[in-house]
Amino acid sequence: MAASGFHPLRFIGRLTLGGLAHIGRLSLLSAELFRGMAEWRIWLPRTITESASVGVGSLFIVLLISAFAGAVTAFQAGYQWQTSLPVYVLGTLITNTIVLELGPVLIGLVLAGRIGARYAAELGTMRVTEQIDALESLGRSPASHLIIPRVLASTLMLPVLVVIADVVAVGFGWIGVKQVLPVTDWDFSYGARYFWRPFDAWYSLIKATAFGWAIGLISCYMGFNTQQGAEGVGKSATAAVVTSSVIILLLNTLLARILLN
Amino acid sequence: MIELRGVRKRFGEQTVLGGVNFDVREGETVALLGPSGSGKSVLLKHINGLLRPDAGSVRVDDLEVPALRREALAALRTKIGYVFQNGALFDSMNVFENIRLGLSDESKYRDLEYSRARVIECLRLVNLTPETQEKYPAQLSGGMRKRVGIARAIAGAPKYLLYDEPTSGLDPVNADVIDDLVVRLDDELGVTSVVVTHDVRGAFRVADRLALLYDATIVLEGTPEEFKQSDDPRVRAFLERDFDPTSFAA
């Protein structure tokens, strides 16, 4: 009689094969993406439209989150403040916390939900309703028509949105800290500039670009490989958000280790 | 000429095509019959390379389709118009943009004046008015969506037309309209067509030859008359579900 129940080796084997299949398909999609770059007349106008949609569409949520994040960072800094330190350090603390970490990671995670779910659901629906097959049957490349514009839009727009988020969050942090501690504008401005290195801004932009690329590529991959109707579209959207978020956290750690140490 | 030899395709444990041989000669219309889920659409997707066989040969104009590289396959696909079961129209684009994407020649695609004229011409061929081009797929009825799908498939002036269940989900009147359209397009455009359907009555109206796909193989390929005369119990069972073949004039 065959033994039933959980087989750890079989489970690990399936997991490994599944992982390798994902890596293989993602590599093939990336190769298609690079080949499709030659068709710039097709992807360029679509990228501009898509970028405008991502940028304008995400602006409200980015402004809202960065304003609250900046204010809360200031209030928490006020709560933990030790009077033995000079108050201008608050400018340094809030600015660096936001620019180096909070801005890119928070906006990356929020947009993984907003853009990632949208991309996966759009492409997934196109897959299950045979629109992607239709595009291929017309001799046209899904990479240049559908994937490159989306991946480029998220890669290009995430840094723009993170810059806006950084500025707004620092601004609200500035206003916020003045409500809880006796910090003058001069103190905050001095502290923010005293320890400021131009590389901090580059680091924030590099992270944002990497996160944008990961969100675009993973979400398009998930949507492009959707199976089994409406349920499959739902699964792809969920998988796109979860996987993008995990990859953002991994990239965040990796980039901190490589670029800051 | 389309030639399939020994085509095998499995999805997981299920064998969908078990060594299928199937020919379509220049200028003829062949209806591929079979029950739902018998693999008719899967076979059709092998012809334009949307699916690759596990084994066997798929040749179109003496080109081995599964062996074609990306550019060669894209070039071949411009010669094959494909009409999808539910239209598969791009729902973010209006009818004009949908049909325009069917223009395989990039210089013509970029020529807006030519595109506009060609889209109107294609709409006329499928009995739709020029005003339809401004509508979005969500604003069209099922029959109109199918006709726009056909218009997109013929926009690039293909040599072959593959129809995947062109009348499924339509009422009998609209199904007859589509069948008449298939016949008229074959005559006016001189295309070679493969019509996948489980509508036996429609198949007899449009096809020069018929093929029945059953249990992953083609059990009979022949003229409508040969189908009517067949004693094969699978053929008879399939035909008699839809109509009494003896009631059809030869």
Image: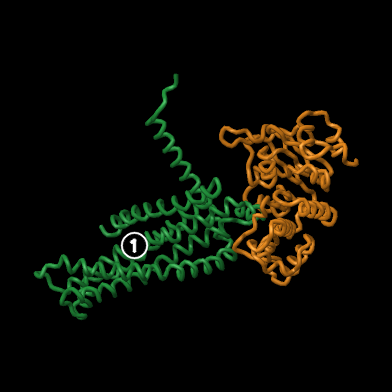
Q: Estimate how packed mark 1 is, as few (under 14), some (14 to 19) or many (20 or more) residues with alpha carbons within 10 Å.
A: some
Residue at the image position 28 percent from the left and 74 percent from the top: A172
Residue most extreme to the right: B250
Residue most extreme to the top: A1
Front residue of this view, candidates A260 and A235: A235
Q: What residue does disc 1 label?
A: A106
Question: Tag count in the figure?
Answer: 1
Q: Which tint is chain A?
A: green
Q: Nearer the viewer, residue B207 or B172?
A: B172
Q: Chain of mark 1?
A: A
Residue at 79 percent across and 49 percent down: it is: B192
Image quadrant assignment for residue B211: top right
Q: Amino acid at mark 1?
A: Leu
Image spot of residue B234 (x, y percent): 76, 31
Q: Which chain is orange?
A: B
**Between A132 and A179, which is closer to the camera in this rendering?**
A179
Q: Is residue A62 visible?
A: yes
